Amino acid sequence: MFRGNHPAKIDDKGRLKLPAAFKLLVDATCVSHFYVTSTDGKTAEIWPLPEWEKREKQLAPYSMDEAVQKYMDLTSYYGQQVQIDTQSRLTLPQILRDSAALNEDVVVLGKMSYLEVVNRESFENRLKANELTADNRKALAAILQPRVDS
């Protein structure tokens, strides 16, 4: 389970060194292959390959659905299967680095079953512009409220 934020840098060859906290989790599962993709061209999603394969199995029965086709088009366009190297680096696809401005300072965010990589400046601006509202807090309270089984 990936969680938290770890600032990082993308090197001049487009490689991201996996932050140590996330590398420990990856090592514990013995994963060395990942699927790097995006659904919007603004962020990179790094999926351990077994997790991405679970996602594909979930979508397979709905392959003719328009939303699923659009999702697969996006994730295939930006996507690339990669292998972590001996120095814990992953190469991000060039097309995704260009569209998401992943070219030095980034944040690597844990999103439960995958990692999200975002241009640091863009992400900080987005956080400032999209603070949690009172309505958001109410919606979260309803989601997090313990359920009573009847």
Image: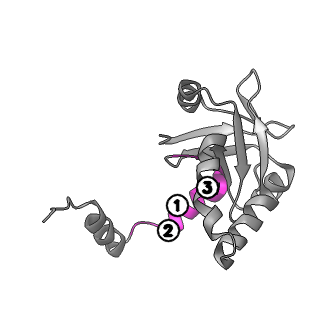
| Secondary structure beneath label 1 | helix
Nearest to viewer (mark 1 / mark 3)? 3
Name the amino acid type tagged 3. Lys
Q: Position of residue 96 (x, y in %)?
A: 79, 55
Q: Position of residue 33 (x, y in %)?
A: 71, 35
Q: Which residues are magenta?
A: 113-132
Q: Residue tagged by mark 1?
A: 127
Lower sequence index among marks 3 and 2: 3
Q: Which quadrant would the C terminus be assigned to in this image? A: bottom left
Q: Residues within 10 Å of mark 1 (few under 14, many from 20)?
A: few
Going from N to C along the chain, the mark reached first, 1 or 3, is 3
Mark 3 Cα-neighbour bin, 10 Å: few <14, some 14–19, many ≥20: few
Q: Is residue 145 magenta?
A: no
Q: Amino acid at mark 2?
A: Asn
Judge from the rendering whether residue 3 lies leftward or rightward of residue 34; answer left or right: left
Q: Residue 131: x and y, percent?
A: 44, 66
> Residue under circle 2?
130
Name the residue located 62 percent from the left edge and 41 percent from the top edge: 50
- Residue closer to the observer: 137 or 89: 89
Asked if one can make out residue 103 in the rendered structure from this viewpoint, the answer is no
Q: Is 108 or 74 nearer to us in this picture?
A: 74
Q: Amino acid at mark 1?
A: Leu
For marks 2 and 1, give the CA distance: 5 Å
What is the image's colouring? Answer: one colour
In this rendering, does residue 56 appear at all?
yes
Q: Is residue 53 above or below residue 136?
A: above
- Give the mark toward the camera: 3 or 2: 3
